[in-house]
Each structure stands twice: as C-alpha cells, then as structure tokens.
Image (cartoon, rainbow, N blue to C red):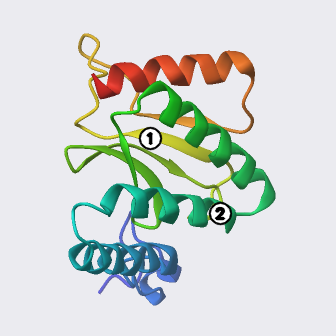
Amino acid sequence: MNATPKAGRSTTTAAKKFDGFSDEERAAMKEHAQELKTAARRGPRTAGADGERDVLAKIADMDEKDRHLAERIHAVITAGAPALSPKLWYGMPAYAKDGKVVCFFQSAAKFKARYATLGFNDPANLDDGTMWPTAFALTELTPEDEERIGALVRRAAS
C-alpha cells in the first residue's frame, strides 16, 4: 500500500471541517429574515418613510469611516434617483425600484472587508456591451466620485 498522500490533498486540510456560511453571512441572513417580517407587518403606506428611517438608523450604527461613506452615498442616491426607495437588505442600506433592490451599500465592517462596496443588482440598467461592473470598492469619496456615482445611479434607476 502507498502511504503517501495523493496529489492535491493536504493532510492539514483533512483535519479542517467546512462549516458552510461564515458568522457574518449567517448574521446577514438573520437580518434579512427579520427585515422581511418587519416589512410584512408594515402597511404599504408607511413603507417608504419606515425604509428611510431604517436605513438612516443602520448608517448611524456604522463605524466612523463607513458611516461617512454611507451618508454621502445615501445623499447622492436620494438626490440623483428619487424614484428609488431606501430599505434595508441583508442588514445593508439598499435602494429599490418596484420592490427590487437596484443598488446597495456594504460597509467594510459587514464582512470584515478591507473596503466598503457600492453594488448594483440585476434590475439596474447598467448593461454596456458584453461586460460591465456591478460593484465598486470605496475607500473615500471625492466630488468627482460622487458625480460618477450619481450618473450611475440615475442610469441604474431608469
């Protein structure tokens, strides 16, 4: 018998157990379930105001750097695309059209990333040929960045 490990396998990896989702991912899924329950209890007439309040509260809970970015992103999105409704999505500030999330802000702390992210989902009208970006890393925002984000959000919401 051959006692040597097979190529591609590591003896240390065999001892590790894959647990599936990370703690942060499980927390995000729990937040999403709670958001769905809360939305079901609210009436459609108050959803917009409640969504705005929820997003602002979530932003206020962020650490200083993420909070500053999120506040600026929120201001740019609400000014540039007033048709988008603020709401929470997996515990992140998001902006929806007809109930579907078009874009969202993911703080760096959310999944212990090195940078915050502005992401766009399928309903965003950003198609450009055969390839286009759907997420942008954010470390700070310049006036030029805010202008570019405003244009992207207006296009995404169209």
Name the outermost residue toward the top: 129
Name the outermost residue toward the front: 45
Asked if 156 appears above or below 59 in the picture, the reply is: above
Left or right of residue 129: residue 61: right
Give the label on residue 89, or none. Answer: none
Q: Is residue 139 visible?
A: yes
Residue 70 spot, x, y in % from top left = 63, 47
Residue 44 spot, x, y in % from top left = 21, 62
Q: Please tell me which residue is depicted at 78% across the width and 52% down the height of the picture.
A: 65
Left or right of residue 69: residue 5: left
Q: What secondary structure is found at the residue carrying circle 1? A: strand
Q: Which residue is mark 1?
A: 119
Q: Amino acid at mark 1?
A: Gly
In this view of the protein, which residue sits in the foreground, 84 or 14?
A: 84
Q: Mark 1 vs mark 2: which is more N-terminal?
A: 2
Q: What secondary structure is found at the residue carrying circle 2? A: loop
Name the outermost residue toward the right: 64
Residue 143 spot, x, y in % from top left = 72, 19
Q: Which residue is mark 2?
A: 109
Residue 23 spot, x, y in % from top left = 50, 81
Q: Amino acid at mark 2?
A: Ala
